[in-house]
Image (spheres, rainbow, N blue to C red):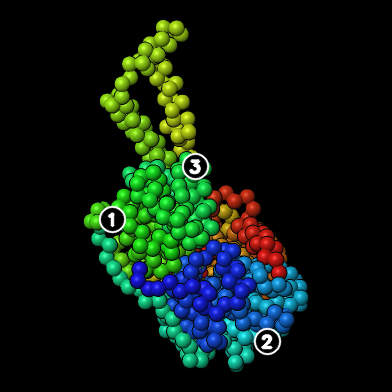
Amino acid sequence: MSSPIIQFEELALSPPLLQTLKDVGYEAPSPIQAACIPHLLAGHDLIGQAQTGTGKTAAFALPLLERLDLTDRQPQVLVLTPTRELAIQVAEAFQSYARHLPGFHVLPIYGGQSMSLQLRHLRRGVHVVVGTPGRIMDHLRRETLTLDGLRSVVLDEADEMLRMGFIEDVDWILERTPPERQIALFSATMPEPIRRVAHRHLREPREVKIQTRTATVATVRQRYCQVGVQHKLDALTRVLEVEDTDAVLIFVRTKIAATELAERLEARGYPSAALHGDMTQALREKTIEQLRGGGLDIVVATDVAARGLDVLRISHVINYDIPSDTEAYIHRIGRTGRAGRGGEAILFVVPREMRMLRVIEKATRQPITPMQPPSQATIAGHRLNRFKQKILDTLAAQELSFFQEVVGQIEQEQDISAGDIAAALAYLMQRDRPLQLPVEADVKPVHPKLADEARDRAEPDDRPSRRRERPREPVDFEVMRYRLDVGHQHGATPQNIVGAIANEAGIESRYIGRIEIHDDYSTVDLPAGMPEEIFQHLKKVRVRQYPLNISRLGPSEPERARKRPVPGRAEAGEKTPRSARTSPVEGEAKTASRRQREIKS
Ligand code: AMP
């Protein structure tokens, strides 16, 4: 990696924000942060081409927090996101980065959440509002949200908003913002409709696109493992157990994560050490020497601390956290396969990072092949083989006559066979690493079909209708057919119907069944048992400015709803158990409101 490291201190951020960055353990700005922060601090409009995982949230949150006037309690920053999940996540990020800014308030606003709660918070005064376009429009129409004091607008994941049919809503909202406001538009791809929005609303935008240098890393075999965040540690220990490793270098994003992961591995019987920028030079060198000499086999490092690390015995590089840019990835995997030896690189990817995987694949000009986290059966097989081999090695290399005598004594004294004694010894030896493992405890890989869809979603594509015929995962619950008062003549598409219902009713898109669009109305299959409050709310939700005015048509034929391909937006993520006791509708709404309460404002 040749570019010099820029420090956060060089980016003209004030002491409270620098303190936050220290607290959260970020060592240095990611490339998108280094490039965007100065422009946004200077008040310029900006177009940033960046995907999830590059650190783009901090790239806009930090400079916009810096520019806030905390004494002015009307919304100064508005962030528009395609989904409620992202709205919550971005609001949480703002809250976290503002931990040393007393009196700071952020409010996530999305459908499916109590309007009165949102109104209460809005009345109390907030500095930053983060929301999905539909609910923001509602508040603007009711004049419960005013944008007179707005200084900055962020369009986050603009291409997703386009894909979900929200781009006209975004246009509508931008038209109601003060003319002198700053706009930052982030998008992984730049299809024409997004360029048009940028052209219409942004003034002399600075463009930030992180140049990715390509490099071949021919001696390193690259694999990726798609796994949910909560299963990462389990997947890691499984990989460590079955891979034929010498020394292993594991990469994480932050100093805190390096220390934590090393401790957690240690607790699971894998002696490990952290390597990060807060350690003294002497301690870092000592750790590297131990790794080089074979006194230590696993090091958990940050990018900065592992710069230039040259240890021949590193057989595996594991990207536990995906790197924020391709250069970092290329540098990381270059720590193995040194001096012409072969090396292994394994990348853990959570579903929302699949786009970044594609970008990395392009930059290394080599395929990164998928792998499943090793199953319990594979692990048990490996343990057994290793155990047998250990016995053979010991028989071949050790003088065992004393122990043979001991075994003989036990046989005679207790009248038991050598086989029984060997079984007891085997048990004692393997107590901490049992040779038989319960099969049901497997780490669930992300459902292969959903993984495919995540990959598809990663394809740059501005033609929302392409996905209309995609077969979807069958779902198993009672289905009700509803009528919506919007059809072809109103410009309704499956995408904007799914987008509106998913965001406003809190129904995950996979529960949204068959959609038929007629000239002046549409029908949609939704899980039965929708709470009245959500039903009433959905009546008022708009698609292309027209209220859905939803009404019940009657139970839908379950077989039809299950077996037919269901159109609509593909959703990346892990499959939840089918037999959810609550209706999917209630379950989602509850989760959302709980998370809302967790964001203290
Ligand atoms: P984002 O692309 O904004 O979704 O960020 C992806 C992840 O990177 C989040 O977990 C952030 O907390 C983390 N992150 C952002 N900036 C940095 C940084 N400079 N150093 C380390 N981690 C970071």
Circle 2: residue type: Gly
What is the number of the mark on residue 86? Answer: none
Give percent across and percent down for residue 516.
Answer: 51, 70
**Can you tell me whether the CB of the residue at mark 3 lies under 8 Å from the nearest atom of ligand 1?**
no
What is the number of the mark on residue 268? Answer: 3
What is the number of the mark on residue 337? Answer: 1
**Can you tell me whether the CB of the residue at mark 1 lies under 8 Å from the nearest atom of ligand 1?**
no
Residue wearing tag 2: 149
Q: What secondary structure is marked by label 3?
A: loop
Name the front one of labels 2 and 3.
3
Residue 19 seen = yes
Q: Check whether the beta carbons of the residues at disc 2 and disc 1 lie within 8 A of each other.
A: no
The residue at the point 67 percent across, 65 percent down is 599
Q: Taking 394 as reference, is 178 left or right?
A: right
Question: For the residue carrying disc 1, how many other residues have a C-alpha within 10 Å: few (<14), some (14-19), or many (20+)?
Answer: many
Give percent across and percent down for residue 173.
Answer: 60, 84
Circle 1: residue type: Gly
Give percent across and percent down for residue 49.
Answer: 44, 77
Residue 493 seen = no
Of residues 338 and 122, the one nearer the viewer is: 338
In the rendered view, would you say 242 is above or below 540? above
Q: What secondary structure is marked by label 1?
A: loop
Q: Check whether the beta carbons of the residues at disc 3 and disc 1 lie within 8 A of each other.
A: no
Q: Check whether the beta carbons of the residues at disc 2 and disc 3 lie within 8 A of each other.
A: no
Q: What secondary structure is marked by label 2?
A: loop
- Alpha carbon separation for disc pair 2 and 1: 56 Å
Image quadrant in which you'd find residue 244: top left
The residue at the point 59 percent across, 64 percent down is 23
Name the front one of labels 2 and 1.
1
